[in-house]
Image (cartoon, rainbow, N blue to C red):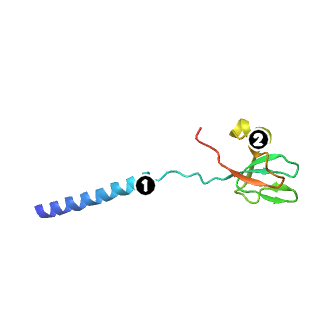
Amino acid sequence: MIIACIISFTIGAMLMMCAIGLMSYQKDKKPRNKVHFYVTVGALGGLELWIGKPIYGYNMWVADDKNCSFLCKAGDLYSKFNLFAEDFHDMKPGEIREVFLNLED
């Protein structure tokens, strides 16, 4: 009887250590931002910010699927997202550039 209790305690302790190890492994993963933001320049030279990658067709940028959406025009880039329009002065019409936003404010 006492041997069965010792074996049960040992197996339970080993399972508990495995569970603690798995939980600590899960907490070490850093959260990743899987959202991509893009700045585009239209045919007339206006900057636009998109969430998801748009496609260029008929001299304008359009959302290609449900994972792409228009966010704002050039005037709101700084006030809403801290992006400076001067940083994109070298872009040509029809060009796209991926940007990284700090969303932890």
Looking at the picture, how far across and down is residue 85, in whole percent? Answer: 76, 41
Quadrant assignment, res 59: bottom right
If you read the primary sequence from the N terminus, does the residue marked by circle 1 or circle 2 appear first? 1
Q: Which residue lies at the image location 88% right of the left edge and 49% below the top edge?
A: 44
The single residue placed furthest to the front in the displayed view is: 90
Q: Residue at x 79, y 48 (%)?
A: 90
> Residue 84 is drawn in which quadrant?
top right
Disc 1 designates what residue? Answer: 26
- Quadrant containing the C terminus in the rendered view: top right
Query: Quadrant of the image for the N terminus?
Result: bottom left
Residue drawn where x is 74% and y is 52% of the image: 69
Task: Relative to 1, say whether 99 is above or below.
Answer: above
Q: Amino acid at mark 1?
A: Gln
Q: Does the residue at mark 1 contact the one at mark 2 (Cβ under 8 Å)?
A: no
> Which quadrant holds residue 72?
top right
> Horizontal placement of 104 versus 7: left or right?
right
Q: Is residue 70 left or right of residue 7?
A: right
State the CA–CA distance, disc 1 to disc 2: 42 Å
Please say whether residue 80 is visible from this viewpoint: yes
Mark 1 Cα-neighbour bin, 10 Å: few <14, some 14–19, many ≥20: few
* Residue 2: image location, x then y, percent: 11, 61
In this orientation, does residue 1 appear? no
Which residue does the numbered mark 2 point to in the structure image? 86
Q: Residues within 10 Å of mark 2 (few under 14, many from 20)?
A: few
Residue pushed farthest left? Answer: 2
Disc 2 residue type (three-letter)? Glu
Counting from the top left corner in percent of width and height, residue 65 is at 74, 60
Q: Secondary structure at mark 1?
A: helix
Which of pointers 1 and 2 indicates the residue nearer the eye? Answer: 2
Secondary structure, mark 2, is helix
Where is residue 6 drawn, in percent x and y? 15, 60
